Image (spheres, rainbow, N blue to C red):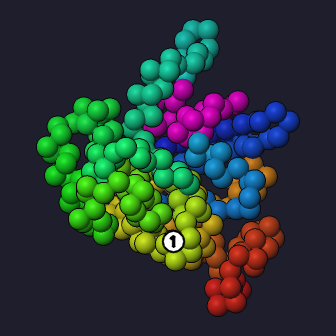
Amino acid sequence: MSAPVLRIGDVRKRFGTVTALDGVSLDVHEGEAVVVVGPSGSGKSTLVRCAHQLEPIDGGAMYLDGELLGHRRSPAGLRPLTERRIAAQRRRMSMVFQQFNLFPQFTVLRNVTDAAVRVHGRDRSTVEREARELLERIGLAGREDHYPRQLSGGQQQRVAIARAVLVRPRIMLFDEPTSALDPELVDEVLAVLRSLAAAGTTMVVVTHEMAFAREVADRCVFMEAGRIVEEGPPGEFFARPRTDRLRAFLSRHLSEKEGVS
């Protein structure tokens, strides 16, 4: 197997006296959709926030395409990178948050294209053409000149995803992308994630949507108390959980129709 796009090795993170990540190791390979599930407070969101360098880690190491993230090696040991270098590394990833984080003063088209043009330096006319094509694919054709306040929550989240896609990241990170949505709007966002996975997008998705995880994931990861307890392909993960902790979690979160054996 080729080297992973993202490698997380023995990463530890604390918030005061609380251990959020307790020696987490995870490899994500090219074209792989990894879905992370677990109870509230298990460290799922902290994991992707650390991967995107929104939170500094307290131990371990992370690599993007073999490049050490957040630090450089020197004869005296590891030294933190400058904020400018960290920002450059972060530009090779995209993250979609629970909240949409759109600019209210920008139109949909400007929200989608601004980072690709202004931060990544791509040609505006090319980016706008790609943005219009992408918006059509995700069901937002004709909304280019609308403002976020004129959109539903599901539409706003699709705009946020389109923005993240358009910068052509090496990997996409999703932190509970449907948790802020009304139930009737969840499916339209999950449909976009399904299409990204089908297209071979390398991504890590933190979610509580078990049916989505079962359908879309190449690999499912279960976290609890800051650790990865179990991982595997969805067929085994849902049908034959190896640990009592995963079995109990699934029994609470799956309906009888989706129950485990």
Residue at 54% from the left image edge and 26% from the top image edge: 70
On the image, the x and y values in percent for residue 127 come to 20, 45
On the image, the x and y values in percent for residue 71 come to 55, 22
20 or 73, which lies in front?
20
257 or 72, which lies in front?
257
Question: Quick check: 246 left or right of 173?
Answer: right
Res 36 quadrant in image = bottom right
Q: Is residue 54 magenta?
A: yes
**Magenta-highlighted residues:** 50-70
Residue that protrudes farthest toward the left in the picture: 125
On the image, the x and y values in percent for residue 75 come to 57, 9
Q: Is residue 87 above or below residue 141?
A: above
Helix, strand or loop at mark 1: helix
Question: Quick check: 241 left or right of 82?
Answer: right
The reply to whether residue 26 is in sight is yes
Mark 1 highlights which residue? 186
Residue at 53% from the left image edge and 59% from the top image edge: 177
Residue at 52% from the left image edge and 39% from the top image edge: 52
Quarter the C terminus occupies: bottom right
Q: Amino acid at mark 1?
A: Val
The reply to whether residue 8 is in sight is no
